[in-house]
């Protein structure tokens, strides 16, 4: 027995030693790719010395004699800190993820190949003006300079992920940056999914009820549409299709806040501007802070690695930001396939599909060959994605027209123009080349402010049978686009009389079809809270703008609870402690005294959110069946229509599959009881001890390793957070059945710009500058972001140098 014990001890000691050795070796090799920010590097591509000063938050301040040299250094800095993120994004746009990561990424690759984003980007290179082309070339040279450093030096393959997924690295080229902008545009639009959803639900409901469940944002009245079944007869009998959506549904499309105050509404006598674009929470975030010293002056703000522009930031005289404009920039078409092979129906007869074969290689699986097809209306979409099978009649394929499918994409040129503009009006004019994504560009100089919708706006025929809201037949000429609207005709506001401008992805125009911007908007609730905060003060300060940016009061909660609970408050017979009736009364008492603040430390936000989620599901489940699974987020407009009985919407409260006639009070009470049961099973019975932050946990996920055993605890970042779906400090919940309130989509960047004292401006990102999990800059800003804190946004070079964590010098290679 003693010998056995000794052998077991020896084996355990050896195993423990091997684990320690393996851990040490893994750390050693992974840490080799941590960049050294104190270096001197020679480069043949630059014309004069360049300096990258990294301040104590690792924000690079780049100084060079020409703009091209500065963008060279920006490319180098991006690649130094975010090489893996950039390579993965490029591979996504190319449709080449499956060859490295396997079958799970095949749907994304198929979509990207069919859209042909990457080849359209390469073609767009020829459309760039001389300045933009020089910037794209210099920026690419800077990225490739870091690739050379990795290849020639001991750089640990450039990123720790490269040890797990080693891949040959092709040189970066200008078309790659254009492709990443197109990929950003695609992820910013949710109109494809919205069209399919409306078409699918319209087949289940009469027109009145469709207006309830997919309500139009209040405003100018909308012309009624026939149901999809009337527009498109002979649909497949199987109305439900598996939903494969490789780019995310409309709930996670682009969102953002931006507002500005003019000199007459600011205590400083100059202007203020705040911007916080919202995006999927990833580790690292998609944003990267940088300061560039251009010939037109210094600028500082938020960039996206792989794209050489500052999309939200300031110069000494100008501040700019953007919100997603929610332009209806996508249309789906049903193309009738001809009996003659390889042809489809058009208004003039038939035409041949444009075709090309494309091979997708898949890790650990045979390669597949796609036959890519295009019609005059755009590329043929994958038939098994987005639920298209449910809305496609037999003998048809589905195509998509989208403004981003341009081979003359000059969006980057537009942003470069804005960055160098000397004043607000010049910046508005300069944004004309922007195509996609379309944005509401918020701009302020020291004396004025303006907002301009920048981006391509499709022109539709007034006779379009679905008004772009649902798929329509591609062979009908009235359904096809008539070009794009002139830039000067796009919505614009300059120096409004009230002195304040703002947008929260809300409805921006009451023009009716076809002159409207969209039927689908990203917000109908945040805007009311913003109006309240702006009107509460005669003049604003930097601090009041920060306060609004971090506001967590839910207008939706304040408006819905009195409606839904109007006949439940303080009613019912007394009930003993521990009974469901007593728990319901207790929950109602707590909500009655709650002010609607979605604070992470409070229990009421969780009770409210669980109640509204259960309520919406109970209202729609019997009418929609499993289609209800696609409506994962509470729509306050729908619930308000039901409980105000707008247009007879209270009919939703009666469960049609039951003999009894339920009232809206019955459904409210049953939904609250259901929510309390779920809360007790998940978090325990003590309602007072609940924390919204425990459910509303922000999860910044690594795009590839988020589920990897052990590694996920290193690469993912999790934080308890305040806010919710409808608060200005937005924290969009996942809607996932297992963890419905996880915060998955929020402000990856926040900036507040004070043009009276520009160096008092502040900004923050949601993780850190580095994409290296072992770097101290991987998540160092994350806790500041969670607490609502900011870091200085100064163009003063002495401040950057005073606490620099490293300085990189570039010198031209001597002849």
Image (cartoon, rainbow, N blue to C red):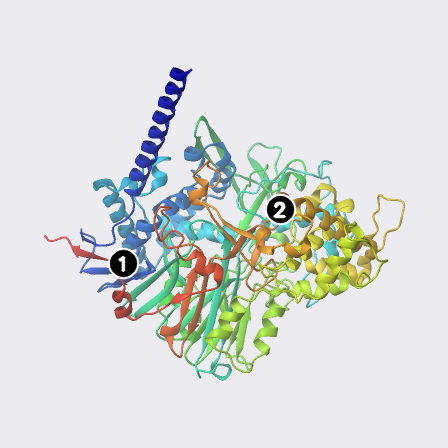
Is residue 632 at all visible to an observer of this figure? yes
Which of the two residues, 458 or 90, is positioned nearer the viewer here?
90
- Kindly indicate the quadrant of the structure image that contains residue 329: bottom right
Residue positioned most to the left: 815
Earlier along the polypeptide chain: callout 2 or callout 1?
Answer: 2
Q: Is residue 724 left or right of residue 134?
A: right
- Residue at x 59% of width, y 68% of height: 508
- Name the quarter where the N terminus is drawn: top left
- Residue at x 37% of width, y 47% of height: 86
Secondary structure at badge 2 equals loop
Q: Is residue 406 left or right of residue 78?
A: right
Which of the two residues, 377 or 16, is positioned nearer the viewer here?
16
Residue 493 x/y as whole percent:
53, 74
Question: Are dots 2 and 1 in contact, CB under 8 Å?
Answer: no
Q: Nearer the viewer, mark 2 or mark 1?
A: 1
- Residue at x 38% of width, y 23% of height: 9
> Which residue corresponds to mark 2?
475
Q: In the rendered image of this protein, does residue 33 appear above or below residue 805?
A: above
CA gap between label 2 and label 1 equals 62 Å
Which of the two residues, 276 or 482, is positioned nearer the viewer here?
276
Is residue 617 at all visible to an observer of this figure? no
Secondary structure at badge 1 equals loop
Residue 385 x/y as whole percent:
58, 39
> Which residue corresponds to mark 1?
805
- Kindly indicate the quadrant of the structure image that contains residue 326: bottom right
- Residue at x 26% of width, y 67% of height: 802
Residue 222 x/y as whole percent:
70, 63
């Amino acid at each position: 027995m003693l010998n056995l014990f000794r052998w077991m001890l020896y084996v355990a000691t050896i195993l423990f030693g091997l684990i320690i050795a393996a851990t040490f070796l893994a750390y050693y090799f992974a840490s080799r790719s941590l960049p050294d920010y104190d270096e001197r590097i020679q480069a043949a591509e630059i014309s004069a010395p360049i300096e990258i000063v990294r301040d104590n938050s690792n924000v690079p301040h780049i100084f060079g004699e020409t703009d091209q040299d500065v963008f060279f250094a920006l490319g180098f800095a991006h690649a130094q800190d975010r090489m893996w993120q950039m390579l993965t994004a490029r591979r996504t746009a190319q449709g080449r993820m499956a060859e490295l990561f396997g079958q799970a990424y095949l749907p994304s690759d198929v979509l990207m190949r069919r859209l042909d984003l990457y080849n359209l980007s390469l073609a767009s290179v020829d459309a760039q003006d001389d300045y933009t082309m020089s910037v794209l070339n210099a920026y690419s040279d800077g990225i490739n300079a870091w690739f050379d450093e990795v290849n020639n030096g001991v750089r640990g393959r450039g990123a720790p992920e490269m040890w797990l997924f080693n891949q040959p690295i092709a040189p970066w080229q200008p078309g790659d940056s254009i492709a990443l902008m197109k990929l950003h545009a695609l992820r910013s639009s949710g109109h494809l999914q919205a069209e399919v959803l409306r078409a699918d639900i319209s087949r289940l409901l009469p027109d009145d009820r469709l207006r309830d469940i997919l309500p139009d944002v209040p405003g100018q009245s909308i012309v009624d549409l026939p149901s999809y079944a009337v527009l498109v007869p002979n649909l497949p009998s199987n109305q439900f299709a598996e939903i494969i959506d490789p780019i995310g549904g409309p709930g996670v499309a682009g969102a953002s806040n931006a507002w500005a105050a003019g000199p007459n509404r600011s205590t400083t006598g100059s202007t203020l501007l705040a911007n916080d674009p919202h995006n999927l929470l990833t580790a690292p975030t998609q944003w990267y802070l940088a300061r560039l010293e251009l010939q037109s002056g210094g600028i500082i703000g938020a960039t996206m690695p792989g794209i050489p522009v500052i999309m939200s930031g300031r110069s000494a005289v100008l501040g700019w930001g953007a919100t997603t404009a929610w332009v209806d920039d996508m249309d789906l078409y049903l193309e009738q396939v001809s009996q003659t092979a390889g042809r489809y129906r058009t208004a003039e007869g038939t035409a041949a599909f444009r075709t090309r074969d494309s091979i997708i290689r898949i890790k650990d699986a045979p390669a597949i060959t796609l036959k890519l097809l295009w019609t005059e209306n755009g590329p043929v979409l994958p038939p098994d994605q987005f639920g298209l099978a449910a809305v496609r009649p037999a003998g048809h394929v589905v195509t998509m027209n989208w403004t981003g499918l341009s081979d003359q994409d000059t969006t980057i040129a537009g942003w470069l123009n804005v960055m160098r503009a000397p004043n607000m009006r010049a910046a508005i004019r300069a944004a004309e080349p922007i195509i996609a994504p379309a944005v509401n560009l918020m701009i302020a100089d020291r004396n004025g402010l303006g907002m301009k919708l920048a981006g391509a706006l499709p022109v539709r025929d007034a006779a379009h049978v679905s008004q772009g809201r649902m798929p329509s037949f591609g062979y009908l000429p009235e359904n096809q686009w008539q070009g794009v609207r002139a830039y000067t005709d796009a919505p614009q506001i300059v120096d409004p009389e009230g002195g304040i401008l703002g947008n929260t992805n809300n409805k921006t125009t009451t023009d009716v079809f076809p002159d409207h911007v969209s039927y689908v908007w990203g917000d109908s609730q945040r805007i009311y809270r913003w109006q309240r905060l702006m009107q509460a003060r005669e003049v604003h300060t930097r601090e009041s703008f920060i306060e609004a940016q971090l506001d967590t009061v839910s207008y939706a909660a304040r408006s819905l609870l009195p409606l839904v609970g109007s006949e439940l408050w303080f009613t019912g017979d007394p009930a003993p402690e521990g009974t469901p009736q007593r728990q319901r009364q207790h929950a109602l008492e707590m909500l009655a005294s709650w002010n609607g603040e979605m604070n992470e430390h409070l229990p009421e936000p969780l009770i409210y959110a669980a109640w509204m989620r259960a309520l919406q599901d109970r209202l729609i489940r019997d009418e929609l069946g499993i289609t209800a699974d696609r409506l994962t987020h509470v729509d306050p407009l729908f619930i308000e229509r039901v409980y105000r009985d707008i247009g007879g919407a209270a009919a939703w409260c009666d469960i049609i599959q039951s003999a009894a006639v339920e009232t809206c009070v019955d459904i409210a009470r049953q939904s609250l009881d259901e929510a309390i049961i779920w809360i007790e099973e998940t978090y325990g019975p003590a309602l007072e001890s609940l924390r919204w932050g425990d459910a509303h946990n922000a999860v910044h996920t690594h795009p590839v390793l988020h589920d990897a055993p052990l590694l996920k605890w290193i690469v993912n970042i999790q934080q308890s957070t305040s806010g919710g779906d409808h608060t200005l400090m937005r924290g969009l919940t996942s809607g996932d059945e297992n963890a419905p309130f996880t915060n998955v989509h929020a402000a990856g960047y926040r900036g507040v710009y004070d043009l009276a004292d520009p160096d008092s401006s502040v900004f923050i990102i949601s993780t850190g500058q580095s994409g290296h999990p072992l770097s101290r800059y991987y998540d160092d800003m994350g806790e500041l972001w969670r607490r609502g804190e900011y870091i200085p946004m100064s163009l003063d070079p002495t401040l950057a140098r005073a606490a620099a964590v490293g300085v990189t010098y570039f010198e031209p290679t001597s002849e």
